[in-house]
Amino acid sequence: MNASRLRSLVDHGVEVIVAVDSTETIDAAKDGGIRNVLIDVNVGLPRCGCDLNEVEILSGYARRKGLNIKGVMGYEGHLMFTPDRADRKRGVAEAMQVLQEAHSITGGDIISAGGTGTFDLNELATEIQAGSFLFMDTRYSTVGLPFEESLTIVSTVISVERDRKRAVCDAGVKSFATDYGKPKLEDGIIEFCSDEHSTILPTEPRGDLAFQVGDLIHLRVPHVDPTIAKHSRLACSQEGYIYGDWKVDLRGW
């Protein structure tokens, strides 16, 4: 945690609440001028968060440092893509039982949890951490959520083989994240992606591609967050009409 960056935000009048999971992060919050914190608890995702048996110790330490504990945070990200809704619901209940026990120790008004994949299954959270629902992606679209994909990468077909069995477009891994798989598109399948190109095959093994050189195609992305971080602007369109242009403030973040 960067204490000087936190201090800069505070000095500009920004109200910041920091999630902490250790004495070191509590110290950094204090040094950065932060007054309000959440105790970050591990509810099953192997990422940040303290163990349940550390919550009381860290709460006491934070209060001795003069910090206000506003509540707890626990992100059940390991459950976002559980295919079966009933299994996902059971997993959320188990994860939130841990967070509820932590909250009974810390107190506070905030229980921050949940995400796009569990927003309607989390009955404990007072603050839902969902974000991907706004644009969605091909992975989230596999778990039956009431949201539609709205983000695509527009690419140009730059090469088509004479037998129409393979085409290439001018967008590759510099344009979209592939940690959750390859992009998808209508009337074709992405065979592989390189830095600045993607190779497209027919949907049917014996089929032909209908693409022509110069065609614009829309690639549906597998992971929306890191894909957006690769771009400076988003073009907002409806039925082919571009009506807005949004700057991506946190490119590369």
Image (tube, rainbow, N blue to C red):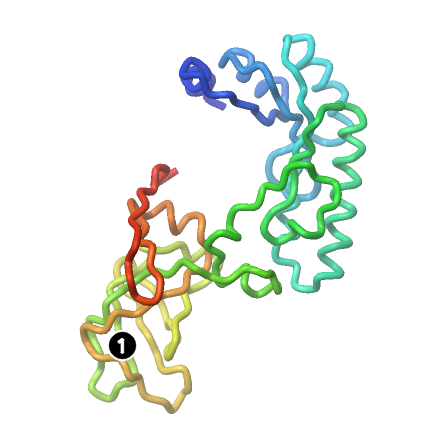
Left-right relation of 249 to 45: left
**Vertical relation: 58 (above or below) 49:** above
Residue 174 in view in this figure? no
**Vertical relation: 54 (above or below) 140:** above
Residue lying farthest to the bottom in this orientation: 206
Where in the figure is residue 157, as x and y percent of width and height?
A: 23, 71
Q: Residue at x 74, y 51 (%)?
A: 91
Where in the figure is residue 149, as x and y percent of width and height?
A: 47, 61
**Vertical relation: 249 (above or below) 166:** above
How packed mark 1 is, by other alpha carbons closer than 10 Å (few <14, some 14-19, many 20 or more), is many
35 vs 44, nearest the viewer: 35
30 vs 215, nearest the viewer: 215
19 vs 116, nearest the viewer: 116
Question: Which quarter of the picture shows residue 173?
Answer: bottom left
13 vs 170, nearest the viewer: 13
**Secondary structure of residue under mark 1:** strand
Left-right relation of 164 to 139: left
**Vertical relation: 234 (above or below) 22:** below
Going by the numbered disc 1, the residue's amino acid type is Ala
Q: Residue at x 61, y 21 (%)?
A: 37
Question: Which quarter of the picture shows residue 7?
Answer: top left
Q: Residue at x 40, y 82 (%)?
A: 203
Which residue is labeled 1 in the image?
167
Left-right relation of 165 to 125: left
Left-right relation of 223 to 19: left
Where in the figure is residue 245, as x and y percent of width and height?
A: 29, 49
Where in the figure is residue 142, as x and y percent of width and height?
A: 57, 65
